[in-house]
Amino acid sequence: MTGPLTAEIELGREAVRAASRLCLAVAASGLDRMEKSEREPVTVADFGSQAVILRAIAAGFPDDAVRAEEGSVDLASAGTAAVDGVTNAVADALGASVTAGEAFAWIDHRGRPGSRMWAIDPIDGTKGFLRGDQFAVAAGLLDHGVPVLGILGCPRLELSGMHGVLVWGGPGIGAFVQSLGDGKVRRISVSGVSDPTRARILGSVESAHGDPELLHRVVEHIGIGGGWVRIDSQAKYAAVAAGMADIYLRPRNREDWRERVWDHAAGAAIVAGAGGTISDLDGRPLDFTTGDVLDLNRGVLVSNGGMHPTVLAALASIG
Ligand code: AMP
Ligand code: MG
């Protein structure tokens, strides 16, 4: 393959594929939920997935900066059984012997500050993962704050006739899907739907991650008639990129909530590559330059492009 970011795409696909398999293997062997700050759940698979991805980035692109959701402090405080669980899961995924010290160092790899930054969510939608529902392994690459490449592993998503998919893409790259088990690569693109009565809309399963009342009013106001699907994680971005749905609307549930960089960077690159549009609820571009969180944006709106003005107009008139 030739073209922009070929080496990054290859490395990212392999790392996200390996991390996705690790997550399924950990889930199959039984899951223990641990709590971290703000009472968000985390599992052995979250830490193991992050170790696998950051090991690959540290080896392949040591000069790139990294922002990632997990840190070894939370793993250390979870106790020895958790540390052993992560070390063993990573060793199994790599087919090599691994020490706890190596696993900790990979989890905490943050590279060097610079214009390029990877945004990693080792398990986006941990609540979905624990329920047996959707989750995504997410790796996004930002260049000067612009999402240029995204890779999503969605092990439980049905897309383009495949069960369990790897989806990747970016502006100038296009967007693609492949079975997580390998096989044929297919190009994907957003839908051409612009008639609200046919539009399909996506939202979070966790009502606390959004504003169900506002979503309901937008659906009524526009007359969205294609149905409403709730799925966890950035798998929603993959669904819009592949034309399975036309709108993903994510209002915040409280004034002071700020979206996290690793929850959107990968998905935003893929949807842009698939021909879609991404903004906040005021129509502003997402600003990925303000640290771990999107400090200057209110919510997120992702669409096939054609539906974007209609949804923004509805939001403006509802207030
Ligand atoms: P989703 O499955 O789309 O609801 O998104 C999962 C992500 O929601 C997690 O990775 C969290 O970072 C994020 N999250 C946690 N709490 C909130 C909240 N109060 N509002 C919005 N997102 C949240
Ligand atoms: Mg997340």
Image: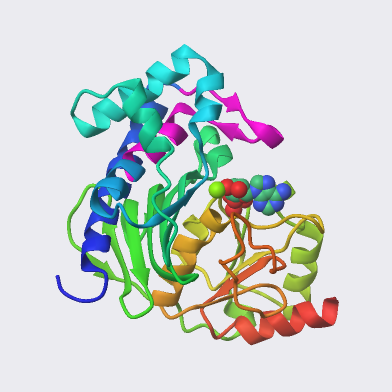
State whether residue 23 appears in this view.
no
- Give yes or no for residue 52 being in the magenta stretch: yes
Q: Which quadrant holds residue 55?
A: top left
Q: In this picture, is 138 found above or below 80?
A: below
> Is the N terminus in the top left, top right, bottom left or bottom right quadrant?
bottom left
Identify the magenta region.
31-53
User: Residue drawn at (63%, 81%), measured in percent from left and top?
Assistant: 196
Q: Where is residue 158 in the image (x, y as percent from the top left)?
A: 39, 54
State whether residue 254 appears in this view.
yes
User: Residue drawn at (40%, 54%), measured in percent from left and top?
Assistant: 112
Q: Which quadrant holds residue 296?
A: bottom right
How many circles with numbers are drawn on the protein?
0
Q: In this picture, is 139 found above or below 216?
A: above
Whether residue 311 sits left or right of residue 157 in the image: it is right
Q: Where is residue 157 in the image (x, y as percent from the top left)?
A: 41, 51
State the residue in front, 6 or 277: 6
Q: In this picture, is 2 found above or below 266?
A: below
Question: How did the renderer colour the structure?
Answer: rainbow
- Give yes or no for residue 188 being in the magenta stretch: no
> Is the C terminus in the top left, top right, bottom left or bottom right quadrant?
bottom right
User: Residue drawn at (60%, 71%), measured in percent from left and top?
Assistant: 287
Q: Where is residue 97 in the image (x, y as percent from the top left)?
A: 21, 23
Q: In this picture, is 227 found above or below 66?
A: below
User: Residue drawn at (64%, 36%), measured in percent from left and top?
Assistant: 40
State the residue in front, 109 or 235: 109
Give the residue furthest to the left: 1
Whether residue 200 sits left or right of residue 237 in the image: it is right
Whether residue 171 sits left or right of residue 132 in the image: it is left
Q: Position of residue 103 (x, y in %)?
A: 35, 29
